[in-house]
């Protein structure tokens, strides 16, 4: 028997790794020790919770703060940390800690897992990601600790602080605030600058991308020396925060006091990409506001980050491509650099897949559940972009609808293209087909 043909590719390792962790998490969450009431949890709900944790999404069918026991919450937090940093990244860190040698295949898989541009220096970058992530999570916990300890006592307050710091940095959006009111998220902290600003910073830092932070730390204020990708990510992220925040300030939260209005506008502009926490009642927002959130959710965070979605670079490439067409240029451009046609084709494919999955799933949910299309689209976009924001329909979904959401979360976390590459093995054909024209637009 030829065992070489069973050798797994990097995409297959990533898909199977995430799948194995999700299944193990689901089996553990089913146990009575995982629930506060000491009862067995149905497999579909345990699978949903494990998937939303590993895929750092935040959609839940059981309130995290009240349904799960301390053991269950610790398990969920562990799954969030694994999912946020990546199964491959954490496995590589354990290999490094044990002194084992990292081979070429492992390095290639690590490169794909964190979207690194080159293989060289991948081990050093992995160490930077692990150490930097733990440091940022610790700082976030220290800042929020006084607020939560004052409200919940020392033991419970420290646990709440640690849980939320890790969850927000990993862009998971899962919270324990159900002890105030089920599924309430951080609405009770809408006018609390310490909690709101800290969570916003954790979301942005986690979603900006490890490669970008490596660039910032290396070159500091010498922006001209940043890689083109880092410049594109920083500019695009800034625009995608500022423009929606201004829109929400004037159109959605005009009834609030000024400080709360500013904090809520910024928070709701940041959290759709892709954290899933909220400080405002999303059902009270206008349909235009909800559609804005859907758009932001689909765009998502940046490559090589804890965030999901199509990614800010995909959005930027499509926008630059449109500008190039308007000016009759033959290629998209950023900061005096040309973007290859392969990158543009990939961006178009990713956009088509995410938008197509969102709308197809929304239609299926609407038919299955008998609900209006907008909340179904909101939920499906939130799932495939691994955001976790909800208009409240997820806890009441039927089993088939839950399976649809679970599939979307898994696809969104491992990456739609990664899943395709893992399942298809199409040999590269030599040569090119004849060129012909087709009219579009």
Image (cartoon, rainbow, N blue to C red):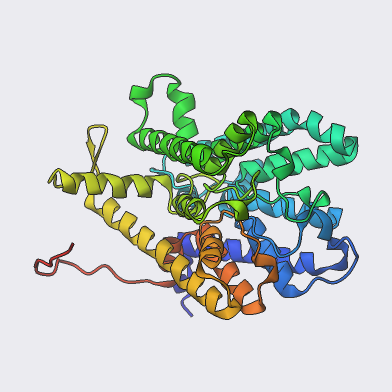
Where is residue 33? Give x, y as percent. Answer: 88, 63
Residue 118, quarter of the rendered image: top left
Residue 166, quarter of the rendered image: top right
- In this rendering, position of residue 13 left or right of residue 178: left
Where is residue 238? Give x, y as percent. Answer: 44, 34
- In this rendering, position of residue 361 left or right of residue 30: left
Residue under the image location 14 percent in, 44 percent down? 329
Where is residue 176? Give x, y as percent. Answer: 77, 49
Q: Is 94 placed above or below 234 here?
A: below
**Viewer can see residue 272:** yes
Residue 344 or 388: which is nearer the viewer? 388
- In this rendering, position of residue 29 left or right of residue 399: right
Where is residue 441? Give x, y as percent. Answer: 18, 62
**Viewer can see residue 99:** no
Residue under the image location 63 percent in, 72 percent down? 402
Q: Is 154 placed above or below 271 here?
A: above
Residue 205 or 190: which is nearer the viewer? 190
């Amino acid at each position: 028997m030829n065992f070489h043909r069973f050798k797994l590719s990097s995409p297959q390792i990533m898909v199977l790794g995430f799948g194995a962790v999700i299944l193990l998490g689901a089996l553990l969450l089913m146990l009575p020790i995982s629930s506060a009431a000491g009862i067995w949890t149905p497999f579909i709900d345990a699978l949903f919770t494990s998937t939303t944790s590993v895929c750092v999404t935040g959609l839940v069918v059981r309130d995290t703060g009240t349904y799960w026991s301390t053991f269950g919450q610790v398990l969920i937090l562990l799954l969030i940390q694994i999912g946020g940093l990546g199964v491959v990244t954490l496995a590589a860190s354990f290999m490094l800690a044990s002194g084992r040698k990292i081979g070429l295949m492992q390095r290639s898989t690590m490169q794909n897992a964190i979207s690194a541009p080159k293989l060289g220096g991948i081990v050093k970058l992995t160490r930077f990601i692990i150490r930097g992530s733990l440091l940022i999570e610790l700082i976030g916990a220290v800042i929020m600790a006084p607020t939560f300890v004052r409200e919940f006592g020392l033991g419970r307050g420290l646990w709440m602080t640690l849980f939320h710091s890790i969850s927000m940095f990993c862009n998971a959006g899962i919270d324990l605030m159900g002890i105030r009111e089920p599924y309430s998220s951080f609405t009770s902290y809408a006018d609390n600058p310490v909690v709101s600003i800290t969570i916003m910073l954790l979301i942005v830092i986690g979603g900006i991308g490890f490669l970008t932070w490596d660039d910032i730390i290396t070159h500091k204020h010498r922006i001209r020396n940043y890689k083109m990708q880092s410049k594109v990510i920083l500019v695009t992220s800034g625009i995608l925060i500022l423009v929606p925040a201004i829109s929400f300030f004037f159109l959605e939260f005009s009834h609030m006091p000024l400080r709360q209005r500013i904090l809520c506008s910024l928070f709701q502009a940041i959290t759709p990409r892709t954290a899933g926490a909220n400080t405002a009642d999303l059902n009270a927002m206008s349909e235009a506001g909800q559609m804005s959130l859907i758009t932001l959710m689909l765009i998502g965070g940046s490559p090589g980050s804890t965030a999901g979605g199509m990614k800010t670079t995909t959005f930027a490439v499509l926008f630059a491509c449109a500008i190039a067409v308007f000016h009759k240029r033959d290629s998209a451009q950023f900061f005096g650099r040309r973007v290859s046609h392969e990158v543009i084709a990939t961006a178009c494919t990713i956009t088509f897949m995410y938008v197509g999955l969102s709308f197809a799933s929304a239609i299926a949910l609407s038919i299955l559940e008998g609900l209006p299309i907008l909340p179904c689209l909101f939920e499906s976009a939130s799932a495939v972009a691994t955001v976790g924001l909800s208009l409240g329909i997820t806890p009441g979904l039927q089993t088939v609808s839950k399976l649809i959401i679970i599939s979307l979360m898994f696809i969104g976390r491992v990456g739609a293209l990664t899943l395709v590459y893992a399942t298809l093995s199409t040999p590269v054909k030599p040569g090119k087909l004849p060129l012909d024209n087709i009219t579009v637009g």
